[in-house]
Image (cartoon, helix red, strand yellow):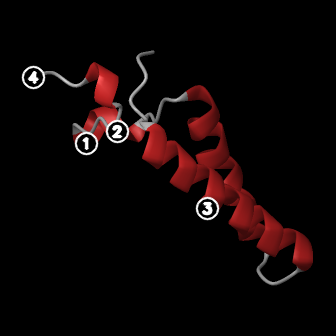
Amino acid sequence: MINNVGGLDRILRIITGLALIGLTLTGSIGAWGWIGLVPLATAAIGFCPLYPLLGINTCAALKKP
């Protein structure tokens, strides 16, 4: 796996994931909030399996000139 998730993308994924999980734990939203684990996991490993299918790469170090 080659990293395809860049810095800003990782930060946004972490914020989104934590917000969804936090809302679930407080009871504001239902169990669907546990989907927040997905952006947290992709931020942690630096790879999003959907990005290659869509031709997206937000990792600046690996972009081709």
State the mark number for residue 12. Answer: none
Distance from the alpha carbon under mark 2 to that under mark 4? 19 Å
Mark 1–mark 2 CB contact (< 8 Å): yes
The amino acid sitting under disc 4 is Pro
Q: In the image as oriented, which residue stretches furthest toward the right? A: 26
Q: Where is residue 21 in the image (x, y as percent from the top left)?
A: 78, 63
Tell me the residue that label 4 is attached to: 65
User: If you read the primary sequence from the N terminus, does the residue marked by circle 1 or circle 4 appear first?
Assistant: 1
Vertical placement of residue 17 versus 9, above or below: below
User: If you read the primary sequence from the N terminus, does the residue marked by circle 3 or circle 2 appear first?
Assistant: 3
Tell me the residue that label 1 is attached to: 54
> Left or right: 53 with respect to 28?
left
The quadrant holding residue 57 is top left
Find numbered disc 1 in the image and state the secondary structure of the residue it sits on: helix
The quadrant holding residue 35 is bottom right
Tell me the residue that label 3 is attached to: 16
| Of labels 3 and 2, the one closer to you | 3
Tell me the residue that label 2 is attached to: 51
